[in-house]
Image (cartoon, helix red, strand yellow):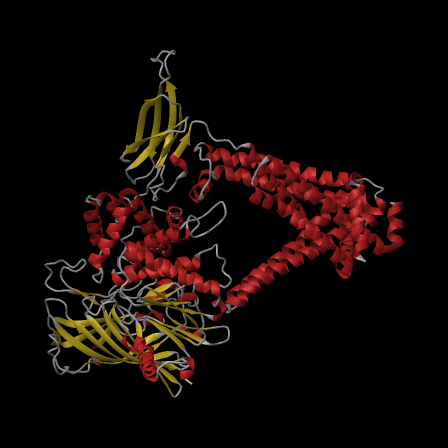
Amino acid sequence: MFYSFFPGARPLRLALFAVGALVLSVAPASAQRSTTSSEPLSERRVAYQIDVTLDPEARTVSGSQRLTWRNPGNSPVDELQFHLYLNAFSPGSTFQVESGGEHRGNSDSRDDRWGGITVERLAVAGRPEGDLGGVLPYSGQPVDLTPNMRFIQPDDNNRDDRTVMAVRLPNPVLPGETIALDIDFESRMPRVVARTGFAEDAQGNPFFMVAQWFPKIAVYEIPGQRYVPADAPTGQWNAHQFHANSEFYADFGTYDVTMRVPEFFVVGASGVRVQETTEDGIKTLRYRADDVHDFAWTAYEEYRVHEATWRHVELRLLLRPAHDTETQVRRHMDSAIAALERFDDWVGEYPYTTLTIVDAPGGASGMEYPTLITGLTLYMGPSWIRVAEMVTIHEFGHQYFYGLLASNEFEEAWLDEGMNSYVESKIMDDAYGEGAFLDIPGLPVSGRHMQRLAYVKQNPSSGNLTTRSWEYQFGADYAKNSYAKPATVMNTLEGYLGWETMRTFLRTYYSEWRFRHPTTRDLQDVVEAVSGQDLDWFFQQYVYGSAVLDYRIDAISYSRDRSIPDSLDARYDYRVVVERVFDGTMPTVLRLEFADGTGRDIPWDGKDRWKEFTASGDERLSAAFVDPEGLLWLEVDRLNNRRAIQPVSPGPTERRKFAVRFQQLALLISALF
Amino acid sequence: MIFTYLKAGIDAMRAQPWLAVLLFSVHAVLGYSIATPIGGALKTSFAASGFEEIDIALLADIPEALLGAFASVFGLLMIATLVLFVWSSAAGVGLPQALRQGGVRSFWSGVDRYFWRGVGLTGLFLIPMGIWTAAVAVLAFILGVTLSSEVTRFWAVLVAFPTLWLTGMAAIDLTLDYARIALVSSDSGVVESAKMGLRHGLRRGAAQAVYLVWFVPSLLLLVLPTELEMFIGASIGVFLLQQLVLLGRSFVSVGWIGSQVALFEDADGPETIAEATAV
């Protein structure tokens, strides 16, 4: 049979070809790396080997994990702290108290909505044998630590919250030592309200988004790291509870995850699949993800799988059947590639070899995990509303700001969400043009305009970027100060520094801080170093503070210079008064526009509360315009930036258009009566 | 069969073109009367800026600049709606009067004789319109929240319910048309006319067919002026063309009522006609 496909070929060559083809067909799955590098890219303080089974009937993921953690500090550590995020979906948790069980419009009141994680056993593993390649093994003894487990509530003392667990060690982990723990656990998946859990489709098929699902060691910050003083005697655990308005923070390492699921499930996961076998109706999959700080996976019977390749990245799109159209595939793939290309150019290389895009329902949509994102797809969603594209680009952007830079999202959410929203809006506008978000004829809405409007029209003086996520009084303040305002702040900074400087800043920030958990201070240091400017005045106002920026032309006039004889060309004296309406300041430009269509720009530091500008020239003044190029994206009212000598009155064409609209309206109202 | 009534409608258009001109003129005057002050209020509030074109950033700023003007604009729109209610009630009885029995009576005699009962009839029909709208909205909301399938929800909430609402509104509107014709033809009271309208409008397939046939050109001619502007651009020529289209729509309105009057008279037989002649 084989030969029939290659008439005239020599048997030996064909045999070699057959062997080669066989090797190639197996090799990608077993030999593909999860990153572009054969060397570790991160410090790898943790390593997880997880082996679990999904029971769809019971909605549980249960099994064991070997967690290896290295003490990165210079002092002994006698307590370990863990996130048990899934316990947020238990009654009485801080998340439930703060959110009332509702997350971004998603809620569920059914009795089986609860979820949680039970740690059945936690023990120090035995000392590994053989050459450990310079790793210092834990000098303590193998011991069952289950009795030592206790829940702590570092943020709010809510005794019913069990999202952070502490375990006292019988012997401390010495500096540089590595401790291995064996943990048996069972995770019961909640109904999807906030990112993780299970749902049923219209046919009753179960969908699982398995995220924040395993006992996860917190970040032990050593002296000099983030805000821990360099001269502090010891490091400290940074473990916050799961809140309504906060996300995550973890250390980098390696994940080797084996999951068993019923064979009919289609699975998508972080990292690269290195093994897949099926036996007795059970599919066993093994994934490996290196230099990441989390691992998530999804299982659903009805996924339709689409694949594409961009340079070194294999893209895998898992669409639900209702969304499985050529248009949706193209919209997702095109936007993902648009993001890959621009992040590569503007920020830096995407070092992973896979990207899985999951079409997840309801509360699981629009979320990021290492090398796996969930999009937002609307059935019959019109192409002129680019929500699907925006969400895909946004969630991909998290691979950089959440994934690779990995700021502390509990404490400084804006460094992830806000910086990502800035780049996302720029990519949208670059890829899709003026109507990037809403392509309405005559009234296009760009990505950057969307971000700006979400800030300036929503109580702009309320809150600042560096408030800890759970301390915002209102969810809307968290959203504004984590997404829209920082994006607008960065667009304004770009207007001030110029795109080339901003691009250099992004690339430098990424190359210097990836895998290192940068802070706001670190970001400011980089942008100041790159621009060569002290930008504290800017950061104090718009990042640390809540200054509001608005300039208004208060008065405009001109008069003929009577000292010039009538026989000579006329000279005019101009006078423009600009008001700084609120407390925010930014250097800007006042443009004088003249009757002959020319203009003259006058730089202004923007500091005075009232500023009178006087000048003279040989043309009549027609208008004055603060920030004519629209670089001050933070400006809360752009309408008052310009003032004309002669107010514009509607022309005949405009009047006619208006009249016809109202004629139609009158006819329509008449028809109703 | 319905061709007879359609032809009667076209004949009515041809016989009394001034009715279409009257309808067109009233709406044009009303349109201009609203457009001028509202346009002026909107424009003067941001005219000082001198911006020639409005983008999304300016559009978002305008409401804040117009807070004062919006109150007067809203008031003006309310007054205009009231005027349109009154006019519709008047035209609703004036047109059947002018078109029935070969068009021997004047539009204004109908207004003079039946205006207040016409207003009452219009007011009465606002009740089922309101109830229907609220019922469909509530049902759509409940299903929108409870339906788990996105596909079913899409078709139910965005397709089926709007269609259902429009169908219901059309049925009420159709009934109102025949109620007005009945009012004028039989000189009965508001409630009795409403009952007759219900009987004629909903029980007879021809009535619904006539309604549908006239509905389509009426809708197209209402939308066409906007399309013309979008595809050709705004100019004095396009404006004149738009006015012609709107005049055409008024002719369609006359033809529509003409067909319905013919159908009513045909169905109701000589008793009503005799009674009406006596009136």
Q: Residue at x 71, y 45 (%)?
A: B89
Is residue A200 toward the left or the right of residue B102 in the image? left
Is residue B129 toward the left or the right of residue A244 in the image? right
Where, by quadrant of the figure, is residue A5 drawn? bottom left
Q: Residue at x 62, y 36 (%)?
A: B237
Q: Residue at x 43, y 41 (%)?
A: B58
Split into 4 quadrants, where in the image is the C terminus of chain B? top right
- Residue A589 placement (x, y as % from top left): 31, 35
Is residue A138 toward the left or the right of residue A380 in the image? left
Q: Is residue A575 above or below residue B161?
A: above
Which of the two residues, A487 or A509, is positioned nearer the viewer here?
A: A509
Whether residue B273 is visible = yes
- Residue A546 placement (x, y as % from top left): 30, 46
Where, by quadrant of the figure, is residue A531 drawn? top left
Whether residue A672 is visible = no
- Residue B240 placement (x, y as % from top left): 64, 37
Query: Residue at the front extreme?
Result: A8
Q: Residue at x 46, y 70 (%)?
A: A320
Q: Is residue A663 above or below residue A258?
A: above
- Residue B102 placement (x, y as % from top left): 85, 45
Split into 4 quadrants, where in the image is the N terminus of chain B? bottom right
